[in-house]
Amino acid sequence: MTDSATRTPDTATSNDFRTMMSGFPTGVSIVTAMDPDGTPRGMTCSSVCSVSLEPPVLLVCLRHGSPTLDAVLSSGGFAVNLLHNSAQQTAELFASGNQHRFKLVPWESEPDGAGPHLTQDAHTVADCDVLLTQRVGDHVTVYGQIRRVTRRVDRAPLLYGLRQFRSWPQD
């Protein structure tokens, strides 16, 4: 017998899912890549997950049709900029759709990098080669084989949960 208080609807809505996932705090990153014409692209992404240690592989989930995803797919590579606790404004900027975002934050394009590195906002950057993609619903899961990890600063990570930004607690 099922208690009505624990019963779930047969089909969850996108709002149900969004509410559920807001209760699962995660780190905040910005995925970046370069268009074929050299235009930097990037978007805030909290859907990042480790997949494998040997070889080192992670995954990111990017909105289907986004200019960032298009740049990732056309270039075959991307950078995952893990944001530190003072980078909330940058996270919000890259989530806003502002077309001038790369003019408002410092970044570098390294010769062997897979995408722009956010020099003041990322505590660590992973340069990745696209290994595999899979479209699911309105997003594309991109698996990236990590070719290089750059530790930029020793700062606490920026977290996001319950629709709020927070910092990792200090000891």
Image (tube, rainbow, N blue to C red):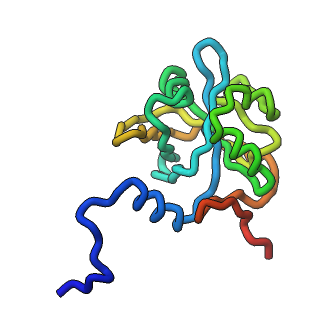
Residue 79 or residue 101, whichever sits in front: 101
Establish if 86 lies above or below 36. below
- Which residue is outermost to the top? 37
Is residue 136 toward the left or the right of residue 80 in the image?
left
The image shows residue 44 at horizontal and vertical percentages of 62, 43
| Residue 80 in sight from this viewpoint | no
Residue 38, placed above or below residue 167: above
In which image quadrant can residue 133 be found?
Answer: top left
Residue toward you, 149 or 41 = 41
Q: Is residue 123 left or right of residue 11?
A: right
- Residue 36 seen in render: yes
Query: Residue at 68% across / 26% down in the picture?
Result: 99
Extreme-left residue of the structure: 1
Between residue 88 and residue 124, name the one nearer to us.
Answer: 88
> Residue 158 appears at what percent x and percent y?
71, 57
Q: Quadrant of the C terminus?
A: bottom right
Residue nearer the viewer, 103 or 36: 103
Measuring from the top left, give residue 101's x and y in whole percent.
73, 31
Would you say 17 lies left or right of 93 here?
Answer: left
Could you say where residue 2 lies in the image, as x and y percent from the top left? 21, 84
Q: Residue at x 47, y 63 (%)?
A: 19
Q: Is residue 76 left or right of residue 163?
A: left
Numbered label tally: 0
Q: Is residue 23 above or below residue 100?
A: below
Dividing the image into 4 quarters, which one contains the N terminus? bottom left
Query: Residue at the location (73% across, 26% down)?
Result: 100
Which residue is painted at 72% across and 35% down in the image? 117
